[in-house]
Amino acid sequence: MSIICFIQAGGTIDKDYLATDENHGYNFVIGKSAFHAISRQAGIPYAIGFTCACQKDSLDMDDADRDTIKRMASAAREDKVVILHGTDT
């Protein structure tokens, strides 16, 4: 069993800045979750769980998204839960 459950909610960790001549990289999309690559590079030496609640910028999250995250965190079998989210809210 995993020791820590990571719940992905989108936001800064998954933003891809798509540079064009017009926006110089200031236009972003929420891309593929960066968590898996980051956790592999970090060499975490124990079992971790990962699940995705949503992939939204934190400014776009609503109460339904927050309820989903709360339900997922409450239902986690792991002793520790880390929620990966945006930095704007």
Image: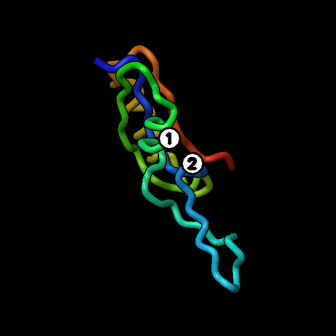
Instruction: Please name the residue that numbered disc 1 is placed on.
Output: 38
Q: Quadrant of the N terminus?
A: top left
- Quarter residue 28 falls in: bottom right
Under tag 2, what secondary structure?
helix
Residue at the spot x=46%, y=53% of the render?
Answer: 55
Q: Residues within 10 Å of mark 2 (few under 14, many from 20)?
A: many
Tag 2: amino acid? Ile
Residue at the spot x=62%, y=55% of the render?
Answer: 59
Q: Position of residue 14 (x, y in %)?
A: 52, 53
Is residue 21 placed above or below 15 in the rendered structure? below
Front label number (2 vs 1): 1
Nearer the observer, 81 or 60: 81
- Among the two numbered marks 2 and 1 on one chain, the one whose residue lies closer to the N terminus: 2
Tag 1: amino acid? Ile
Mark seen at residue 61 = none
Residue at the spot x=33%, y=20% of the render?
Answer: 2
Nearer the observer, 53 or 15: 15
Q: Position of residue 35 (x, y in %)?
A: 46, 42
Question: Farthest top residue?
Answer: 79
Disc 2 + disc 1, Cβ < 8 Å:
yes
Q: Position of residue 26 (x, y in %)?
A: 69, 70
Residue at the spot x=38%, y=26% of the render?
Answer: 48
Q: Position of residue 51 (x, y in %)?
A: 36, 38
User: How many marks overall?
Assistant: 2
Instruction: Please name the residue that numbered disc 2 is placed on.
Output: 13
Under tag 1, what secondary structure?
helix
Is residue 60 placed above or below 18 in the rendered structure? above
